[in-house]
Image (cartoon, rainbow, N blue to C red):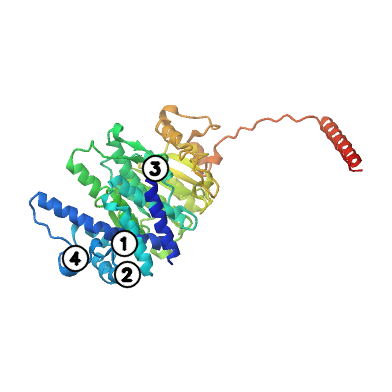
Amino acid sequence: MRLAPELKSKIDSLWDKFWSGGLSNPLQSIEQMSYLIFMNRLEAMDTFEQKKAQANKQTYKSIFEGEENEKCRWSHWKHFPADKMLIHVRDKVFPFIKDIHDGEKTLFAQHMKDAVFLIPKPSLLQEAVTIIDELKISAQNRDTQGDIYEYLLSQLATSGKNGQFRTPRHIIRMMVELADPDINDRICDPACGTAGFLVNSYEYILKKYTSKDKIEVDSEGGYHNLLGDKITEPKHWDKLWKDTFYGYDFDNTMIRISLMNMILHGIKAPQVALRDTLSKGFTENDRYTIVLANPPFKGSIDKSDINDALTIQTTKTELLFVERMVHLLQIGGKCGVIVPDGVLFGSSNAHKKLRQILLEQCQLEGIVSMPSGVFKPYAGVSTAVLIFTKGGSTDKVWFYDMDADGYSLDDKRTFIDGKGDIPEIIQHYRNRKKENPADRKGKCFFVPISEIKENSYDLSISRYKEIEYAEVQYEKPEVIIEKIEKLENEIQKSLRELKTLLK
C-alpha cells in the first residue's frame, strides 16, 4: 500500500494506544477510532460546504450553528486537558453526532442510534485525538484518505486482531477483475463486512475511466491517482456515488466501519443497511447486475427465520448465501463468491441442489481453487472462487488450480510478490474461450457438464485434474546392499583410526 512511512507509524501508534489502553477487542477499537475520525472530518466538511456556498453566493446553515453546537467543533475541544476532554466528548460531542440531520453528513450519523462511546481513559482519548489530528485526514487527497483507513483496517489482519473479518485485499482485487464491473452496474455485497468488495469495485471502475498515463501502481498491485477523468457526464458521477454500491450486514458495527471506509474512498452516498439477507425480513430480488461476497463460513441460522424464497433445505449459511446471491441478480447478472471446498463436493441433498442450481439455472463460468493457506493464520480451510452468470445453463466449466497467491502460505503470510498466479488467472479466464484448454495436467482446463453430472455434480478440481507421475528408476537390491556394506566398512575403519588416535 502506498502510504508514507510516517503516516503508517502514526496509525501503528494509534492501534498500540488502544491496545494498551484497555480496548483489546479490535472491532470495538476501530469503531471508536471511526467515531473520532468522523468528528474530525465533520468540521472540515462543514467548512468546505460553507466556502462553496459563499463562492456561489448561496446561503448556508452550518450544522454547528448555535452556542452549544459550536462547542462540538473538533477545533474547539481538541486541546482540552484529558479529563475535561473525555467528559466533553462523551457527554456533548458524541450525542451531537448521533443526531445530525443534514444531507451527506447524516449517512454516518443515521447508523449510530445504538452506538456507545467506550473509550475508558482520559489519557487514551487525548492521545488518540492528537494522533488523528496529526494525520490531517481531511487535508489529504481522496487516495490518501482511503489508504489511511485501509491501513487502519489492515491491522485487523495482524496477529490477535480478528483477521477473520477481512478478505485479503489481493484476492478481492482478483475477484473484481474477474467480475469486471462497469459504470452502469448496480453492485451488491450481501455480507459486506468492511466493504472491501464495494471499495475495490469503485476503484476498478475509476481505473477504467482514468487516462493510463495518470495511473500509479504500488508494490502490492494497488492502483492510485484514479481520477476518473474520462467520466465527463455529471449524471454518471451521480449514479456512481448514489446508485451503484449496496451493502448489507447484520452487525451494526460492521455497517459503521464499512460506511466510513466507503466515504473515505470517495463514495459520497453509499447505500449500506443493517439487514440479515438470509432472514424472512429481506425481500430484495432480481435487482443487481453484479454481486461480490465472501459470506460467513461454517455458520448456521435458526430454521424458522430462513427466508421463504430460499429453496435449499439447510441451515448452513455458506449454502444459503450462494442461493441468496442467485436471487439478488438480474438475469444476465454476474456473481463472484468465495466458498469453502465442501460446497463443491458435499454429498448432502442441500449441497447437490445448490450445485444443480449453479449448473442448470446459471452459467457457472469458472472455479478458481485456492490453496488452503490463503486465510491463514485464522483458518486453514481450502476455498474456491465461483464465477457465474444468472440465467441459461452451463455447457462446460473452466477450472484453475491456484498454487500461489503472492504470499507465503504459512501462518506468517510473508509478502513474496503480492501476485502469485493471479495475473495468469485473470488472463486465462478472459481468454478461456479462445484457448479452450483441454489438457487436465495443466493449471487450467474445461470440463463438460455431462461429465460433471455423471460425477453427482461434483465440482472439486481434484475430481477432474490429472496428476502426472514421474517414473523413478531404482537400483537392483543387490547393488544397494553392496553399497551399504561398503559404507559400513568405511565407518568401521574410521572408528578404528579414531580409537588409535585417542590412545
**Residue 89, position as x, y percentages in the image:** 29, 68
Q: Would you identify the image quadrant in which residue 175 lies?
A: top left
Label annotation for residue 86: 2
C-beta proximity under 8 Å, tags 2 and 3: no
Secondary structure found at label 3: helix
| Residue at image mark 3 | 173
Examine the rendered structure and indicate whether residue 321 appears above or below residue 446: below
In this rendered view, identify the residue nearer to me: 105 or 362.
105
From the viewer's perspective, is the residue at label 1 or at label 2 nearer?
A: 2
**Which residue is painted at 15% across and 64% down in the image?**
65
Q: How far is mark 2 from mark 4, CA to CA?
A: 17 Å
Local crowd size for mark 1, using a 10 Å CA cut-off: few (<14), some (14–19), many (≥20): many
Closer mark to the observer between disc 2 and disc 3 = 2
The dot on residue 35 is 1
- Circle 1 — which element? helix
Residue 456 shown left or right of residue 230 in the figure: right
Residue 156's place in the image compared with 96, above or below, is above
Mark 2 crowdedness (10 Å alpha carbons): few <14, some 14-19, many ≥20: many
Q: Earlier in the sequence, mark 1 or mark 2?
A: 1
CA separation in Å, label 1 and label 2: 14 Å
**Residue 261 in picture, x, y percent from top left:** 33, 53
Whether residue 103 appears in this view of the structure is yes
- Say which residue appears at 22% left-offset and 63% top-offset: 73
**Which residue corresponds to mark 4?**
70
Give the x, y percent position of residue 150: 37, 50
466 to the left or right of 357: right
Disc 3 marks which amino acid?
A: Arg
Q: Are marks 1 and 2 in contact (CB under 8 Å)?
A: no
The three-letter amino acid code for the residue at tag 2 is: Leu
Amino acid type, label 4: Glu
